[in-house]
Image (spheres, helix red, strand yellow):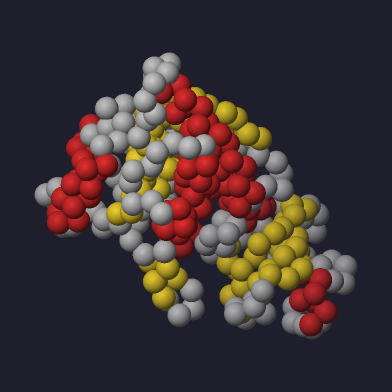
Amino acid sequence: MTALRVAYAGTPEFARVALQAIVDAGWTVPLVLTQPDRPAGRGLKLQPSAVKQLALERGLALAQPQGLKLDGRFAADAQAAQAALQAAAPDVMVVAAYGLILPAWVLALPRLGCLNIHGSLLPRWRGAAPIQRAIEAGDTQTGITLMQMDAGLDTGAMLLTEASAIGPDDTTTTVHDRLAAIGARLVLQGLQAAQAGQLRPQKQPDAGVSYAHKIDKAEAAIDWQADARVIERRLRAFDPFPGATAVLAGQTVKLWRGRVVANDAGVAPGCWLPCAEGRLVMACGSGALEWLELQLPGGRRMPVRDWRQRFPGAVP
C-alpha cells in the first residue's frame, strides 16, 4: 500500500504539535503552508510562526502566501501556492489553525480532501476562538473534532472526536495544551483510517450550533457590573491573550487570576470591599471578585499579596 502524501496548513503552536506528530510518525509531507512572518515583541521584529520553525528544522518545503483567492488582492501569492500544491501532489491536506480561508480550489485539490483539527466538540463553537469561548461560557467539557472540510465555516462532516474536561482552574493555555496533544493523536488515527479507506464521515447535528467569534482586544477591559462568575471565567479565557485589564491605583493593570467571593456588605459594583490585609476584593454586579494575580505595565505577573506589600497604602 502506497503511503499517503500529506500536505499541511497551520500556523501557531497548536498546529505545530500535530505537524510534529505527523512527521515523527513517518508520513510524507511534501509541502507546508503557514502564515507570513508577523511583527512581534517589543521591537516588532518579524517572527516566523511555530509551524514555520518546525518545517525549517525538519527540512520541509514551505510556502507562506498572504492569500489563497486566485482572483483576490494576493492573486500572485495564490497562484504560486496553487503551483506548489499541484507539484506536491498531496493525497490529503491536514489543516489546523491556519488562519486563511481555504477556497474551493484548495479543498478540491487533494483526492481525499482536507482534514481539519478543530478545538471543540462540533457543532458547538464553530469559528476562530473555540477554546476561549468555551471557558468564557462556563462549559465543563470541550474536545477535538477531526472534520472533513467543506466550503462552510466548520460545517463539514465529523470523522473523529475526543472529549476533554474543563476544570475550574483551567485557562486557555492549559486547555490548549491538552487539546493540541489530543489533536495530534486523532490526526494520526485519521490518516491511518484514510490510508485504509476506513474514514466514516458523520453529518454534524443541526441542534447545538454556536459560534466562537475571534477575540478582540477591546474585550479585555473588565465590566464590574457583570456577575463575578462571568468575570472570573473571562480572566481564565483571556489567559494568555489578550489578558483582562482593570484600573488599580490609577494604573491599568492586567488581572490574571481571581476568586469569586460573597459581597455581604452590599458594596456597589466597581468598589473595594473591606477585607483582611494583603487582599484586594472588588464588588461586581453580583457577588465579588478577589484579585489573586496581576501584572503591572512593563512588569511580570505577581501575586496580589506581593503588590500589597510593595504598595501598602495604594488602595483602601
- Which quadrant: the C terminus? bottom right
- Which quadrant: the N terminus? top left
| Residue found 61% across the figure and 52% down from its top | 173
Q: Nearer the viewer, residue 300 or 304?
A: 300
Q: Is residue 64 left or right of residue 119?
A: left
Q: Nearer the viewer, residue 203 or 267?
A: 203
- Looking at the picture, how far across and down is residue 71, in whole percent? 11, 49
- Looking at the picture, how far across and down is residue 126, in whole percent? 42, 37
Q: Is residue 280 left or right of residue 88?
A: right
Q: Nearer the viewer, residue 253 or 161?
A: 161
Residue 257 sits in quarter: bottom right
Q: How many marks?
A: 0
| Looking at the image, residue 160 lies above or below residue 268 | above
Q: Confirm whether residue 1 shows in the render.
A: yes
Q: Residue furthest front?
A: 1
| Residue found 53% across the figure and 60% down from its top | 241
Q: Is residue 101 left or right of residue 277?
A: left
- Looking at the picture, how far across and down is residue 281, in whole percent? 76, 64
| Looking at the image, residue 203 lies above or below residue 255 | above
| Looking at the image, residue 303 lies above or below residue 261 | below
- Looking at the picture, how far across and down is residue 30, in whole percent? 34, 43
Q: Residue furthest right?
A: 276
| Residue found 62% across the figure and 42% down from its top | 178
| Residue found 56% across the figure and 56% down from its top | 238
Q: Confirm whether residue 130 shows in the render.
A: no
